[in-house]
Image (cartoon, rainbow, N blue to C red):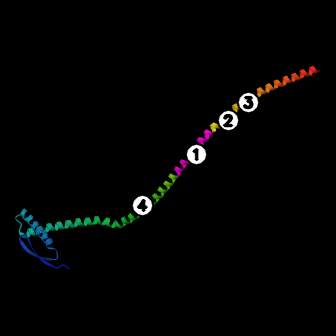
């Protein structure tokens, strides 16, 4: 417990001794404030006696006190509402953190899936390119085969023409042979 002390002060030219536990500097500030209020009143109206100026100063200080208290109550009221909602805000914050963590996990899963799908797509694109290269190669082979078939068909056609001509010639030779045989047979007869 703080010990009481005596502090000598001067208000409106009068000496007072104040006994209390407050620091001396604080008590002197209060005394200076009251003294200044009284001097302000007497400087504005020199007809005021010491008692009247002290009473009016007390009334002004009481007015300041009541206005300050009213403002303090207003500010406390304004501060009370957020403070009452503090627990709800904290609960909502925790709930939001939980939702954010769940969304981060979900986002991470989607990223992994996206990477997997991207890899699969790249593999599919590479596979498609290999198939396209194979198709191009087969198409070249097909063209070469078609050219070979055309060439063989042309040779077959030429051979058929040659065969027909050879058959005609052979038929002609056979006919002449027959005529020659017939001619020999007629001469023998």
Res. 149 mark:
2
From this view, report whether residue 131 is shown above or below residue 41: above
Q: Earlier in the sequence, mark 1 or mark 3?
A: 1
Q: For residue 122: magenta?
A: yes
Q: Secondary structure at mark 2?
A: helix
x and y percent of residue 151 in the render? 67, 33
> Which residue was labeled with disc 4?
100
Q: Main secondary structure of the magenta part?
A: helix
User: Residue at position x 14%, y 68% from top?
Assistant: 59
Q: Secondary structure at mark 1?
A: helix
> Which residue was labeled with disc 1?
131
Residue situated in front as seen by the camera: 138 or 110: 138
Q: Which residues are magenta?
A: 120-141
x and y percent of residue 111 in the render? 47, 56
78 vs 44, left or right, is: right
The image quarter in which residue 62 lies:
bottom left
Res. 70 mark:
none
The answer to whether the residues at label 3 and label 2 have Cβ atoms under 8 Å apart is no
Q: Earlier in the sequence, mark 2 or mark 1?
A: 1
The answer to whether the residues at label 2 and label 1 have Cβ atoms under 8 Å apart is no
Q: Earlier in the sequence, mark 4 or mark 2?
A: 4
x and y percent of residue 56 in the render? 11, 67
> Which residue was labeled with disc 3?
159
From this view, report whether residue 158 is shown above or below residue 47: above
131 vs 76, left or right, is: right
């Amino acid at each position: 417990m703080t010990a009481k002390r005596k502090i000598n002060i001067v208000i409106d030219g009068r000496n007072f001794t104040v006994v209390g536990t407050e620091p001396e500097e604080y008590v002197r500030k209060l005394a200076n404030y009251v003294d200044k209020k009284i001097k302000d009143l007497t400087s504005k109206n020199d007809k005021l006696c010491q008692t009247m100026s002290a009473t009016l100063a007390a009334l002004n200080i009481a007015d300041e006190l009541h206005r300050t208290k009213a403002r303090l109550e207003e500010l406390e009221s304004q501060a009370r509402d957020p403070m009452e909602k503090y627990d709800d805000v904290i609960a909502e914050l925790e709930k939001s953190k939980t939702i954010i963590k769940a969304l981060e996990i979900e986002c991470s899963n989607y990223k992994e899936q996206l990477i997997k799908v991207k890899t699969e797509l790249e593999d599919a694109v590479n596979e498609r390119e290999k198939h396209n290269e194979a198709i191009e190669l087969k198409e070249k082979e097909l063209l070469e085969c078609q050219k070979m078939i055309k060439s063989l068909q042309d040779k077959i056609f030429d051979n058929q023409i040659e065969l027909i001509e050879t058959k005609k010639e052979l038929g002609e030779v056979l006919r002449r042979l027959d005529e020659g045989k017939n001619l020999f047979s007629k001469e023998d007869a």
